[in-house]
Amino acid sequence: AENAAETMLVLKSQSQADRHRQEKSLSELQEALHLSSPLNRIECYDISNTQGTAAVGSMVVFEQGVPSKRLYRRFNIRSVSGPDDFASMEEVLMRRFNRWKAAQEQAGIPGKKNDKAFALLPDLLLVDGGKGQLGRAVEVLERFDLLAKVPVAGLAKHNEELFVPNQSESILLPRHSQALYLVQRVRDEAHRF
């Protein structure tokens, strides 16, 4: 009984520390990106291919700084031939927001179940890549009239730079900040998936 009680205290303490670290990383990222709303849902997109063929897009979702694997989705690239990451990213995001739009239209229909992965908008949309991928993401958000509603950033692997629309300089998060660790975890999870 004593061992169980002590183990419970240790687990509870670890859980509180993890929750604090997640809250800190989300608030640091919100501050670095100058966002007015708290970050609850972060979606990250990545494109992968095998020597220019079999291109696939991944969508990973983090809620409150924790992966929500039930909301992950894969997209087989249909309309792009060859290794064109920009066009592939555009296709994936178009399909994602078309599904969001369809979910909004079906929201009032009794008996219709929406896919929870697409029914909500992200509080931050991250694309793996630099200015090129970010540009395509911005174009897609503009087509759906969502650019003012959905903050977007591109994460370039070189120096872990964050690019945001209408800002020529990249954002470099402090090297040992919780926000940097969070965006790296999100991006690495998109790569893995």
Image (cartoon, rainbow, N blue to C red):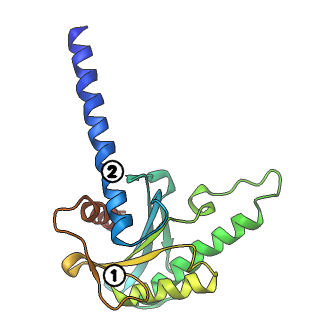
Query: Which residue is more in the foreground, 89 or 151?
Result: 151
Q: Are marks 1 and 2 in contact (CB under 8 Å)?
A: no
Query: Which residue is more in the foreground, 161 or 157?
Result: 161
Residue lying at 33% horizontally and 85% vertically, measured from the top left: 130
* Dot placed on the residue nearer the N-terminal end, 1 or 2: 2
Vertical order, 172 against 9 (above or below): below
Instruction: Tell how many labels.
Output: 2
Q: Neighbour class for label 1 at 10 Å: few (<14), some, many (≥20)?
A: many
Horizontally, is 71 left or right of 185 in the view?
right
Q: Which residue position holds label 1?
A: 129
Please indicate, yes or no, whether residue 48 appears anywhere in the rendered image. Answer: no
Vertical order, 150 against 179 (above or below): below
Residue lying at 22% horizontally and 18% vertically, measured from the top left: 6
Q: Residue 72: give x, y in percent of width and height.
A: 47, 59
Q: Quadrant of residue 168?
A: bottom left
| SS at badge 1 | loop
Horizontally, is 160 left or right of 96 in the view?
left
Q: Residue 11: give x, y in percent of width and height.
A: 27, 29
C-alpha distance separating marks 1 and 2:
24 Å
Camera-side mark, 1 or 2: 2
| SS at badge 2 | helix
Check the picture and name the quadrant holding the C terminus.
bottom left
Residue lying at 59% horizontally and 86% vertically, measured from the top left: 142
What amino acid is found at the position of numbered circle 2 in the picture?
Gln
Which label sits on residue 168?
Answer: none
Query: Which residue is more in the foreground, 135 or 27?
Result: 27
Residue lying at 29% horizontally and 62% vertically, measured from the top left: 179
Q: Residue 153: give x, y in percent of width and height.
A: 40, 77
What amino acid is found at the position of numbered circle 1 in the picture?
Gly
Vertical order, 123 against 151 (above or below): above
Query: Which residue is more in the foreground, 156 or 164?
Result: 164
Q: Which residue position holds label 2?
A: 22
